């Protein structure tokens, strides 16, 4: 007997309307029709949340409700009727929907650009670039290596150009460079090609003088590689891949926001490394349709829910972003996330208080999936990030940290055909400077939010799917409100987001009975800070901007949201102009060599 799963597993938020006389009207996205069911049959559907044969479902229900043996046949017949109506669906049916092709199989696309944003770290950049050039030579790769340089002083930029020119000659590779001068020239070219100049300037050049500009460098890479697949890597990563400590066969389709697992190496121990082609690792999923991803293995659907199947029903789903995980420093800006780990990751973290405290202060991890995994929406960390930019992707928030987190939310909201792919293995992340967090990092992380987190709160409140210009207009309209009204719009959305986190931590505290004590004490401390800090007006002032520009932070943030909203409205035109310029031989980055003359 084929195994079956009810729609309340795949579509837990099915619209239901009471009709009276014990009847309900239930709409099924899979059948595209409304069904009149008895309350008993609705309850029956709600109990069938896993794949199992009809006989197994009936036997389980009989045991759970202590029913007489004769009732099993009636339950089995009721389940069969629900299956005939399309309100129960088989694993094979769901798999077939996932593998439905909207066109013929495609050849796996290839990555054409490796991009590295950098700022004032020539030694780290040298290590990173050399590791990629050496890997490319070993694996016969002919790609462009593009460095986007945000270094503030001209002497550092000059030394980086010289180093790139030397590496270009030594490896006989296509090495490109763009600093402020090259970006300024390109903004002018975009304007001549019809793109809005003010928005392009904000996307690339940091006209407001914010402290962190990594997102602008990532936008520059997107425009340089418009029409291609690219791999963006941070300048403190290396082109070495640590195999996952554990593996599972096959492929998974998942609705989990974070499908990765964590391992916490003992102090002084580094993860093993393999001579894998990092580009080939990403190309297993990047740019491919879900049908092509699963051509060699039937996907495991146990973690896929309503969002996944709905998204797949609407279009030919494609993996637009990939990540190969991290081995080394986590790259996370706060330790708060560790408190909410579950399953095997939680067990590893809490194996001892020593392991737990070391993880909180040093963030040395292996974070990866145990098999290739495709999600309809997920977290995003740009330490090594594959991007399919053959059709326009959203831009990154040009300034401040966690631009990749904002990008991930935009992708979920604005690209209804877009899926995230995660690959086993961790790319080495080795910052040149020692990194450690203070003992009170958890409480400081709970006491205030960064500007990127507040932008994410705005974006997650929007309906999905929504096109990018509409998202931009909404943000710009909110930011055009008087300051007090803008802060009220922000407060409502921040409270929703942080209440979810607080509720999750409280649920975990209850679920695990307040054990182990060292973890539970930290969770209680964080919840206490939430309760105290969230009602304050200061909580609506981004902590990162407050530390940078003091009392002007609230107004600066409102202006940042306004500029970002305008950029989102203009971004499709900017990308189109970049593609037109490329056809005419004009690229953002130029071959490594002497500086561009303005």
Image (cartoon, grey):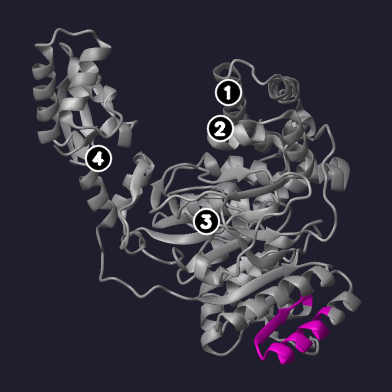
Determine the CA span between mark 3 and mark 1.
28 Å
Pinpoint residue 329: horizontal percent, then vertical percent: 73, 51
Mark 4, other Cα within 10 Å: few <14 / some 14–19 / many ≥20: some
Q: Quadrant of the C terminus?
A: bottom right
Which residue is label 2 attached to? 342
- The reply, left or right, for residue 416 in relation to residue 448 is left
**Mark toward the start of the polypeptide (3 vs 2):** 2
- SS for dot 1: helix
Query: Magenta region: which residues?
Result: 160-180
At a point 24% along the width and 20% down the height, the residue shown is 60
Mark carried by residue 29: 4
**Mark toward the start of the polypeptide (1 vs 4):** 4
> Which residue occupies the foreground of this view, 38 or 560?
38
At a point 12% along the width and 11% down the height, the residue shown is 69
- SS for dot 3: loop
Q: Nearer the viewer, mark 4 or mark 3?
A: 3
> Which residue occupies the foreground of this view, 135 or 483?
135
Pinpoint residue 180: horizontal percent, then vertical percent: 78, 75
User: Is the magenta region chiefly helix, strand or loop?
Assistant: helix
Mark carried by residue 424: 3
Determine the CA span between mark 1 and mark 2.
9 Å
Determine the CA span between mark 2 and mark 4.
31 Å
> Mark 1 and 2 residues: CB-CB less than 8 Å, in contact?
yes
The answer to whether residue 488 is above or below residue 78 is below
> Mark 3 and 2 residues: CB-CB less than 8 Å, in contact?
no
**Mark toward the start of the polypeptide (1 vs 2):** 2
Q: Nearer the viewer, mark 1 or mark 4?
A: 1
Which residue is label 1 attached to? 508
**Mark toward the start of the polypeptide (3 vs 1):** 3
């Amino acid at each position: 007997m084929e195994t079956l799963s009810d729609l309340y597993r795949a579509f837990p938020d099915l619209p239901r309307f009471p009709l009276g006389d014990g009847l309900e009207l239930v709409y099924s996205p899979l059948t595209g029709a409304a069904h009149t069911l008895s309350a008993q049959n609705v309850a029956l559907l709600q109990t069938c949340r896993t794949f199992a044969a009809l006989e197994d479902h009936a036997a389980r229900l009989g045991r759970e409700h202590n029913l007489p043996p004769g009732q099993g046949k009636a339950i089995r017949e009721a389940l069969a009727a629900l299956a005939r109506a399309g309100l129960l669906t088989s694993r094979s049916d769901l798999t077939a929907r996932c593998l439905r092709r909207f066109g013929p199989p495609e050849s796996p696309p290839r990555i054409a650009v490796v991009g590295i944003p950098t700022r004032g770290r020539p030694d780290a950049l040298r290590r990173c670039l050399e590791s990629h050039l050496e890997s490319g030579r070993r694996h016969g790769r002919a790609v462009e290596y593009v460095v986007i340089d945000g270094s503030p002083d001209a002497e550092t930029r000059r030394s980086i150009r010289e180093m790139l020119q030397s590496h270009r000659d030594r490896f006989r590779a296509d090495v490109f460079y763009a600093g402020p001068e090259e970006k300024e020239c390109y903004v002018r070219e975009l304007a001549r090609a019809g793109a809005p100049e003010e928005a392009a300037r904000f996307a690339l050049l940091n006209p407001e003088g914010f402290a962190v500009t990594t997102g602008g460098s990532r936008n520059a890479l997107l425009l340089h590689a418009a029409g291609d697949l690219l791999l963006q890597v941070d300048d403190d990563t290396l082109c070495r891949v640590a195999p996952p400590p554990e593996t599972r066969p096959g492929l998974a389709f998942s609705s989990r926001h974070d499908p990765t697992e964590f391992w916490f190496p003992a102090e002084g121990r580094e993860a093993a490394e393999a001579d894998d082609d990092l580009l080939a690792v990403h190309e297993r999923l990047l740019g491919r349709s879900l049908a092509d991803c699963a051509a060699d293995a039937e996907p495991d659907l146990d973690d896929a829910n309503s969002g996944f199947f709905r998204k797949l029903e609407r279009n030919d789903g494609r993996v637009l972003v990939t990540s190969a995980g991290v081995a080394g420093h986590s790259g996370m800006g706060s330790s708060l996330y560790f408190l909410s780990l579950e399953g095997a990751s939680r067990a590893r973290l809490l194996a001892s208080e020593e392991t737990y405290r070391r993880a909180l202060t040093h963030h040395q991890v292996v974070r990866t999936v145990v098999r290739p995994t495709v999600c309809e929406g997920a977290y995003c960390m740009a330490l090594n990030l594959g991007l399919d930019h053959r059709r326009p992707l959203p831009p990154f928030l040009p300034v401040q940290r966690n631009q990749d987190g904002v990008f991930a939310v935009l992708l979920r909201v604005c690209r209804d055909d877009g899926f995230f792919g995660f690959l086993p293995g961790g790319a080495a992340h080795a910052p040149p400077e020692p990194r450690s967090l203070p003992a009170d990092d958890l409480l400081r992380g709970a006491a205030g939010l960064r500007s990127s987190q507040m932008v994410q709160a705005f974006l997650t409140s929007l309906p999905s799917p929504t096109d990018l210009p509409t998202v931009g207009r909404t943000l710009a309209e909110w930011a055009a409100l008087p300051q007090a009204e803008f802060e009220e719009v922000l407060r409502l959305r921040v409270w929703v987001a942080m209440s979810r986190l607080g509720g999750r931590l409280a649920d975990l505290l209850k679920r695990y009975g307040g054990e182990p004590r060292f973890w539970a004490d930290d969770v209680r401390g964080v919840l206490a800070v939430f309760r105290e800090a969230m009602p304050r007006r200061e909580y609506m002032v981004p902590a990162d901007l407050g530390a940078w520009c003091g009392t002007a932070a609230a107004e600066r943030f409102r202006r940042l949201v306004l500029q970002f909203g305008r950029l989102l409205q203009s971004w499709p035109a900017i990308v189109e102009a970049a593609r037109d310029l490329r056809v005419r031989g004009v690229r953002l980055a130029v071959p490594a060599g002497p500086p561009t003359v303005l």
